Image (spheres, rainbow, N blue to C red):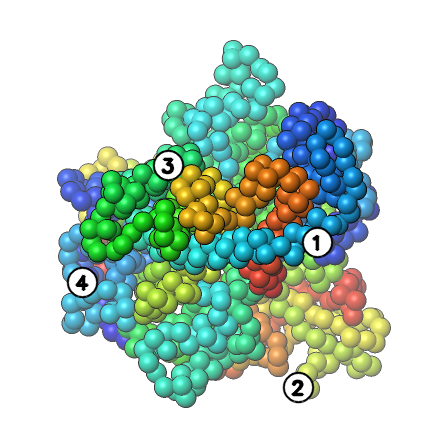
Amino acid sequence: MSSITLKSLQHSYLSNPQSEEDYALRKIDLTWRDGGAFALLGPSGCGKTTLLNLISGLLKPSEGQILFDDRDVTSLLPDQRNIAQVFQFPVVYDTMSVYDNLAFPLRNRKLPEAELDERVQRVAMMLSIQNQLKHRASGLTAADKQKISLGRGLVRSDVNVMMFDEPLTVIDPHLKWELRSQLMRLHQQVGFTMIYVTHDQTEALTFADEVVVMYEGEIVQIGTPEELFSRPRHTFVGHFIGSPGMNVLPCEWYDGGAVFGGYSIPLNKNLPNPASTSNLQLGIRPEFIRLVSEGIPAQIKRVDDVGRYRIIKAEVGGTNLNIYASEEVEIPSGALHLDFDPNHTHVYCDGWIHEVKGQS
Amino acid sequence: MINKTINQKAWFMVLPVLALVAFNAIIPLMTVVNYSVQETFGDNLFFWEGIKWFEDVMRSERFHDALGRQLLFTLLILLIEVPLGVGIALTMPRQGIGVTICLVLMALPLLIPWNVVGAMWNIFALPDIGLLGKMLNGVGFDYNFTQNPFWAWVTVVAMDVWHWTSLVVLLCYAGLRSIPDAYYQASKIDGATSWQVFRYIQLPKMKRVLTIALLLRLMDSFMIYTEPFVLTGGGPGNSTTFLSIDLVKVALGQFDLGPAAAMSIIYFLVVLLLCWVLYTLMMRNETN
Amino acid sequence: MSIEFRELSKQVYGEVHISHTDLSLNPGVFNVLLGPTLSGKTSLMRLMAGLDQPSTGSVWFKGQNVTGIPVQRRNLAMVYQQFINFPNMSVFENIASPLRIQKLYESQLRPRVEKVAELLKLTPYMQRKPSELSGGQQQRTALARALVKGADLVLLDEPLVNLDYKLREELREELPRLFADTGATVVYATTEPHEALLMGGYTATMREGRVTQYGPTHEVFRKPHDLATAKAFSDPPLNTLKLKRTEQGFEGEKGLSLQLPPFQNVPIGEYTLGFRPHHLRIQCNGKDILELSGEVTVTEITGSESFIHLRWAEHDWVAHTPGVMLFPPGEKLELYVLASNCLLFDSQEQLVPAQV
């Protein structure tokens, strides 16, 4: 187990990058503490897989350094970095049994059979595949094969970091629950540093202590799931996290406060005037818009019922927004009146959150 | 599995091919079967012999010798070409301009007409003026493929290896290309050696392709005619007279149609048997 | 324009892919086939399309028996999970291809292609080849090709499953609207209940080759006929509890005793109680509350809600609560469910209706 530090890390797949666009990954500086669970979240092409492969050593970075604890591992090969990786689709050695698959990395490291057996049995129990140890690996379901891939990383004692590259992609939804909760339990038991790459926000938020949101090669925000939910620093984070994502509404600055659709929106803090008032937006999540009897009037366009809750698609003066209503709330027909929760209303200037200096 | 819908019109499209196959394959085959059970002295006079020709052929020492040589040849071919082909496929680059260059180089031997191959090697191996012949003699070997059976064998085998290994290479290369990168990455992380990567990842994934390559080489080498004929004519003596060369000698040289026909059929059945055995052995694990 | 199955079944090498099915899908409506992988959704779609022939039974379309008719002669369009487009043709050519097969003239063809391209936001990419497009754009091209054909039957086999999470959200909203105006019968296969609830007019739940229920989506969701349907329609998985009805009430393992007022009159026997994860509460007000307990195995937190995984006597439950609540593993919690939120299934896994 070790902490991971990235120093001025950049990567381009081209041999002679000329400009910013040529870089798949732009300058990154960050430190992940030992034993934590971290997620890299972002849409396809945002650079998260590139970053993962740089940390695991499958790619050598164009610039910058990678440190495990205080050791510079930038030029080390994957098997010298003591990492384990689980890929998008299960990677198992078809000709071997489940037992031999799990034992493979240990046999390569010349572990004595007795200790090897104990480890394999223990890991098989953790993953609930102890009854299949004698079976050939090729005949199992995708979920079980992924467990074997996972197991090969868990049997080793010298693992610094475990990495997951969208591992639940081929798994059925109801099995995803089982595997995810098993992963979490494993993390609590074993305490490895774990890095999890995904484009699915539920997976990232449930798994990680800290999530790194990426977009087009850059880190947009790093924070706990709560922080990302309550205080997105960029409209992209607000949009990407949450289903549906944050409402981003055009707004104006007037008299020291925000104005939307002609209505003054209360904020819970005294904000200074923004540097430019030309590209201002108001961000509020559907969960924080309340239905009241007197407030901003809105027209209901449609209500989507998802069983547990409903999403009201409404319109205020030509702008569409989504409102979250849980099962019990009654939705009036026709016109609505809305109230924005001041604690969760944010102002964004050119996409970035506008706030008092010194606030985190 | 797609069940093709029944379309009666398709039979009309197939008719020309059916006619061609019938003319070129079925009818001659039936003719051969016909000849194999009869005796003829020409002039369309036929006498029923039953299985006499079959018995004769099976008992003839000449047939046994030719069959023996053939089996040895095929065995050598498979033992050399398959591992060599796999080895070359493993070292071929998977990306970049090298891929095209290698593929073209590998394809070249396969494009040459077979009798030209025989002729090429004939000249190449001439002990006095051929590049190979002169070089081997210069180095100290007493090389003469027209007079020495051992060298004749070496030359014939070398020629076949040069000609056909590329087929194995191309097939195996295609099989290797289909292995996703993640397997190599995972094995690197597991600390596997190159040998283990080969044994546990590459070989199993290549199994289907390798089966095809083996079957093709088995069949083709067992039926080989043109190249050795042009190269050595079956000589010196009959040391490189393989089954098909012998068959042609009997049929066209001696004009013993009956025995030749019987030999053809036995030949055909032997090839069929070998292929079936090999296929079953290799596919035995697939249904698990 | 409805599609109907009569006594349909399909076996392949002795394996039953579809068992005895009678089903009639409604025309002009978004029909969802919901079920886990290998439940028979794709097999059923292939039978609808004519790509496969049934082992028994028949397929009827618009009142006519189309069972033997090859797929080329049926007027249908199909979109797959993998983004299937003609790789050598531009987006424009791809979308135009079904119209070209119908032998339309260029002047008739062009406006239709452009209109559909605009609906699917492909106008800036018309001259690109599929390899130059992102996954989402490739799938939009495939959808455009299906839409422009104007077919009576449109089959969509999990078309969004290979797309990014946010792209899926976007397309999920657009798809029903796109096909609603054509009046075609649309069949959409998916494994996610969430999608069915958001998109479907009607849903058919499937499990192990059988259609377990078909009806308006919200009705199937709220009133499943059997346990299989309830399970198929639940994400996170449905919580279940085995109970025995005795003289006194309902008894479970570990001496658990419950009163279920809506089910007081059910006969003695074995039952399964089902309750959805968001109905399993940490605190509860109201009448007729069931009291349960469980031990926390792990808690998953998204920024705004928590999934608490619990274990009680061989049952694994998930409680889905709003807000961020972190419970350490091993902690014992008191849990509550409103009796009115419970579903009761008898020993044959059929729903027992509640008496209010």
Q: Quadrant location of residue C31? A: top right
Residue under the point 51% across and 22% down: C96
Task: Tell me how many marks there are.
Answer: 4
Q: Is A107 in front, or is C50? A: A107
What's the residue at 55%, 12% (across, down)?
C105
**For the residues marked 2 and 4, what is the alpha-carbon distance in whole angstroms?**
57 Å
The answer to whether residue A309 shows anywhere in this view is: no
Badge 2 and badge 4 in a common chain: no
Q: Mark 2 points at which residue?
A: C254
CA separation in Å, label 3 and label 1: 37 Å
Q: Is mark 4 on a helix, strand or loop?
A: loop
- Residue at the spot 42% in from the left edge and 62% down from the top edge: B201
- Classify residue B18 by image quadrant: top right
Query: Could you tell which of marks 3 and 1 lies nearer the N-terminus?
Result: 1
Establish whether labels 3 and 1 are both on one chain: yes
| Residue occupied by mark 3 | B119
Tell me whether circle 3 and circle 1 mark residues in contact (CB < 8 Å). no
Q: In this view, does A358 lie to the left or right of C218?
A: left
Q: Quadrant of the N terminus of chain A?
A: bottom left
Using the numbered discs, state the Cα–Cα distance from disc 1 to disc 4 in whole angstroms: 76 Å
Is A354 or C327 nearer to us in this picture? C327
Circle 4 is placed at which residue position?
A74
Chain to which mark 3 belongs: B
Q: Which mark is residue B55?
A: 1
In the rendered image, the vertical position of residue A94 relative to residue A329, given as above or below: below
Identify the mark at residue B149; answer none if there is no mark.
none
In the depicted structure, whether residue A80 falls above or below residue B283: below
At mark 3, the secondary structure is helix
Q: Which quadrant holds residue C134?
A: top left
